Image (spheres, rainbow, N blue to C red):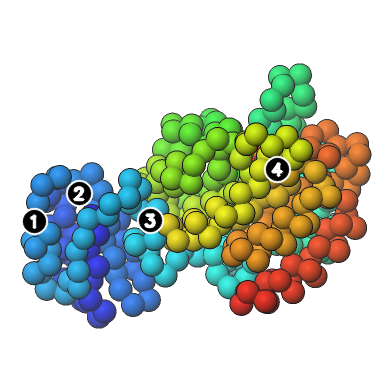
Amino acid sequence: MLVVMQQGATEEQIDAVIGRLVELGFNVHRSTGVMHTVLGGVGGEEKFDLEVFEVMEGVKEAHRIVSPYKLASRSFKPGGTIVKVGGVEIGGDRVVVMAGPCSVESRDQIEQSADIVARSGANFIRGGAFKPRSSPYSFQGMGEEGLRLLREAADRHGLLVISEVMEIAQIPLVSAYAQILQVGARNMQNFNLLRELGNQRMPVLLKRGIAATVEELLLSAEYILSGGNYDVILCERGIRTFETYTRNTMDISAIPVVKTLSHLPIVADPSHGTGRRDKVAPMARAAVAAGADGLLLEMHPDPDHALSDGAQSLRPSQLEELMPQLRLIAAAVGRSM
Ligand code: PEP
Ligand code: MN
């Protein structure tokens, strides 16, 4: 359930409502907005009278949240969530770009990548050190050595780092090197991993599963939020449909749908969304036009020799060409870049 406090409600009044929610068995999550403080109660008694809260001092309104996800729903935080990472805001006015190779492959490769990414004006370098590959015989990632190389290259070029965590045991390690923990499409419903990420105080980028509905994506986000980690960024990366020309079908409509249903920022990954580098730029432009808060782009200094996802990795010149186009589109929809 949700209790929306009046503008200017005092801390005592807020505490009194929290106390009442706790009495009724709810876990309380507080969202302090510019105008209103909203208290979300989850997991409490089914049968109780909303009036109990409506008549309390400082309460504006109380209602039950009908969607299966509560803390991820737009009503919990009508103004939207901004995730702050190392001075960069995701979900604010600026569209944020995270770019880099699918995998960290070598010192030279990641150094060149960081140089290109920084010069393009992007804020984050991406690169997996633990790779979820469809085949056990494919390159599985460099592990900790890859994280170290990624971090060093990022630091040399003033970039922030996003990297994937595939299992609970990797959380401390990846957290030591990256500022955002990426949960891959294949792990969107790894509920044990999500619960453990809820215990962290680290931003998490949660990718939509290849066959997941938007509701399932939001329920997976709810696992993380309900643990008290509110820094969740969603990612549309394409879903599997009957179409085979592209690797996945980039569901651009998921962006405005998520914006309606949830307060969480959403970024778009047109690289995995299309699987073809010639289709990445058009879908990136479309995603920004549709209201994406950011982009996750694969770019490789030499994509023809990439150890993973070369076909969908932009060439450096393509990233360079794309960035000014994105800036124009961002401005056209009232954003900046
Ligand atoms: C990746 O970002 O390289 C990746 C493995 O993505 P996804 O989980 O979306 O397939
Ligand atoms: Mn990839």
**Label 3 CA crowd tier, 10 Å (few <14, some 14–19, many 20+):** many
Whichever of labels 2 and 4 marks the residue nearer the N terminus, that label is 2
Q: Are marks 3 and 2 in contact (CB under 8 Å)?
A: no
Q: Are marks 1 and 2 in contact (CB under 8 Å)?
A: no
Q: Where does residue 245 sit, x and y in percent of width and height? A: 76, 38
Whichever of labels 3 and 2 marks the residue nearer the N terminus, that label is 2
Whichever of labels 3 and 1 marks the residue nearer the N terminus, that label is 1
Left or right, residue 108 beside residue 172: right
Q: Amino acid at mark 2?
A: Phe
Whichever of labels 1 and 2 marks the residue nearer the N terminus, that label is 2
Whether residue 270 is visible, yes or no, is: yes
Q: CA distance from mark 3 to mark 2?
A: 17 Å
- The residue where tag 4 is placed is 272
Q: Which residue lies at the image location 55% right of the left edge and 69% below the top edge?
A: 92
- The residue where tag 2 is placed is 26
Q: Amino acid at mark 3?
A: Ser
Whichever of labels 4 and 1 marks the residue nearer the N terminus, that label is 1
Is the CB atom of the residue marked by disc 4 within 8 angstroms of ligand 1's nearest atom? yes
Of badges 2 and 4, nearer the viewer stands 4
Whichever of labels 3 and 4 marks the residue nearer the N terminus, that label is 3
Q: Secondary structure at mark 2?
A: loop
Q: Which mark is residue 73?
A: 3
Q: Which residue lies at the image location 58% right of the left edge and 73% below the top edge?
A: 93
Q: Where does residue 255 sit, x and y in percent of width and height? A: 56, 57
Left or right, residue 255 beside residue 68: right
Q: CA distance from mark 2 to mark 4?
A: 39 Å
